[in-house]
C-alpha cells in the first residue's frame, strides 16, 4: 500500500496562469503544509489551519482516480502545488504513477527542501521568496538543489512587489545565470472581489515591472509575466 | 557588401507579448512586405502601402548598429517580425550577425515560404492563419516546412476569433501533434483607443477560448494565451 498525501484541492482542467508553462492546459493538485509563512501568501489556507478540516489523506492511486473523475480524458498534464509539496517524500510515487499514464508533471516549490523525485518533474519551478515575503532564503540549500536538478527542465521564478524584491531577483539571476529566469508581478490584494479594480492595479504593476527590467542591463535573458488566472478570474479559488 | 532588408520599425527593449517566449525581454525588427492580406491583420501598414515612405533599406550591419543604438547593452534577444520576414532571403545574414554577437533570435512567419535560414532561428513561431483571416493555407508547403525545421526550437500558433477558427486550430494540432502548440485570442478591434473596454473584451474572449479548449479532449497538450502587450498598452505601436 502506498503512503498517503495530504490533499486540499484537486481541480481542472484549467490553464497554468504563471511561469515556465504559462497558458498550459493542466489539472491541479494542491497539497497541504508549508515550511514558510510568506506575508502575502495567496494559499495561506494550506498552512494557517483555516482549511484543516478539508485536508484529505489520499494515496497516489486515489489522487489519480479523482483526477480522471474530474478531468475525464481532457488532460495530459498535472501541476502539483501547495503549500510546499517538496515537504512530502511520497510525491515521488504520484509522479511515477502519472508518468506511467503518459501525463506530464509540473511542480512549484520555494527550493527550501530537497527530494530525490525533484529530478523527475517535467516542468520544475523553483520560486525563492524575496524580502517582502519576510522569509529568509537559505542559499546553500537553494544552490545545492539547483545543482542537482540542472539536467532537468527547471526554471527560477521570483515574485516582485517592490524595488527590494527586484534587487533580490537580480541577485538570484546573477547567482544562477544559466537557469531560465522569470519575474512575476506580485498580487498584494488577494481578497478583493472588485475584479475591475484588481485588473487595473495588476496591469499597472506589470507595466512598472516591465519598465524596471527593460532598463536594466543586468536583466537581459529574463521573462516578465503577470498571473493570467488573476486577470481572468480575480481572486476566485479552484479555477 | 551585404544585400539590403526593407525595415519598417526597430524598437525595444520590450516584452514579447505572445507565443512560445511570452514575456521575454527582446528588441523588435519589423520588416515590410507580406504575401497574405489577413482580414484582421494588426500590421497591415507593413503591406497596404500606408507606410511605404517609412520603409528604410538597411544592411544587416546597419540593423545591428541601430539595435545597439536604441537598446544599448540592455538586450540579448531580438525578434524579427513583419509582415512576413520569410519573404526575405537575406534575413539569414542578419541572423548570423546577431548570433556572432551572442544575441538569440526569434521569428514569426505564417509558414507560406521556405528559407534555409529558418533552421537557424532560436525561437521559431509558425502561425498558419485560420478561416476568419480569409486566407487559404497551403498545407503542402506548411507540412514540408515543419518537417525541415523539426530539429529546431519551433512552435505552432493559431490565432482564434471564432468557432471555425478553433476547428482549424484543432486540425493543425492533429496534423502536427509533436510540435508545441499555442492558441491565442484574436484582437478584432485593432484601432480603438478605449483601453478599458479593450481589456474587458479581450479578457472575456480569453476566458471563452480557455473554456473551449479545457472541455475538448482533442486539445490537451495545448497552451492558451492572450496578447500581453495589448493588455498593457492597448493598440499602441512600437512598445
Ligand atoms: S512558500 Fe508559497 S505556500 Fe508557502 S507561505 Fe510562501 S507563498 Fe505561501
Ligand atoms: S500574415 Fe501576418 S502580417 Fe501578413 S497579412 Fe496576415 S497577419 Fe498581417
Image (tube, coloured by chain):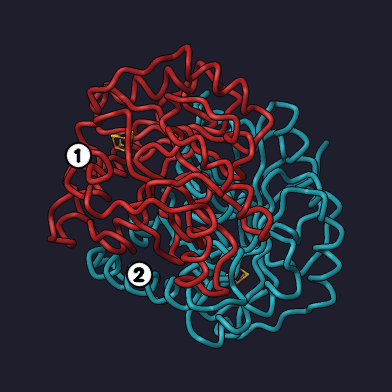
Chain colours: A cyan, B red
| Residue B39: image location, x then y, percent | 19, 32
- Nearer-the-camera pick, B164 or A46: B164
Residue B193, quarter of the rendered image: bottom left
Location of mark 1 (residue): B48
- Residue A171: where, in percent of width, then height? 68, 80
Image quarter (top left, top right, bottom left or bottom right) of the N terminus of chain A: top right
Drawn side of residue B50 relative to residue A60, left or right: left
Q: Which residue is mark 2?
A: A202
**Mark 1 vs mark 2, CA separation in Å:** 36 Å
Residue projecting furthest to the top: B140
Q: Nearer the viewer, mark 1 or mark 2?
A: 1
A31 versus A187 height, above or below: above
Q: Position of residue B217 (x, y in %)?
A: 47, 23
Q: Give the x, y percent position of residue A118.
A: 79, 52
Foreground residue, A151 or A26?
Answer: A151
Label 1 environment density (alpha carbons within 10 Å; few <14, some 14–19, many ≥20): few
Residue at mark 1 shares a chain with residue at mark 2: no
Residue at 21 percent across and 36 percent down: it is B40
> Callout 1: helix, strand or loop?
loop
- Side of B187 relative to B78 (left or right): left
Chain under numbered label 1: B
Return the residue nearer the eye: A116 or B6. B6
Q: Residue furthest front?
A: B1
Amino acid at each position: 500500500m502506498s503512503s498517503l498525501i495530504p490533499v486540499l484541492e484537486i481541480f481542472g482542467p484549467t490553464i497554468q496562469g504563471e511561469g515556465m508553462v504559462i497558458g498550459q492546459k493542466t489539472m491541479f493538485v494542491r497539497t497541504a503544509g508549508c515550511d514558510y509563512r510568506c506575508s502575502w501568501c495567496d494559499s495561506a489556507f494550506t498552512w494557517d489551519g483555516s482549511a484543516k478540516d478539508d485536508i484529505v489523506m489520499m494515496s497516489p492511486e486515489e489522487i489519480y482516480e479523482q483526477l480522471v473523475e474530474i478531468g475525464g480524458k481532457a488532460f495530459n498534464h498535472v501541476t502539483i502545488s501547495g503549500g510546499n509539496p517538496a515537504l512530502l517524500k511520497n510525491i515521488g510515487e504520484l509522479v511515477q504513477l502519472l508518468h506511467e499514464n503518459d501525463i506530464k508533471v509540473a511542480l512549484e516549490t520555494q527550493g527550501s527542501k530537497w527530494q530525490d523525485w525533484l529530478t523527475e518533474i517535467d516542468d520544475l519551478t523553483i520560486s525563492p521568496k524575496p524580502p517582502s515575503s519576510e522569509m529568509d532564503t537559505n542559499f546553500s540549500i537553494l544552490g545545492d538543489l539547483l545543482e542537482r536538478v540542472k539536467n532537468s527542465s527547471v526554471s527560477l521564478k521570483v515574485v516582485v512587489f517592490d524595488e527590494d524584491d527586484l534587487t533580490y531577483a537580480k541577485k538570484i539571476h546573477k547567482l544562477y545565470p544559466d537557469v531560465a529566469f522569470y519575474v512575476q508581478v506580485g498580487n498584494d490584494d488577494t481578497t478583493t472581489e472588485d475584479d475591475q479594480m484588481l485588473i487595473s492595479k495588476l496591469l499597472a504593476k506589470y507595466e512598472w515591472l516591465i519598465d524596471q527590467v527593460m532598463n536594466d542591463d543586468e536583466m537581459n535573458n529574463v521573462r516578465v509575466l503577470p498571473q493570467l488566472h488573476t486577470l481572468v478570474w480575480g481572486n476566485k479559488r479552484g479555477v
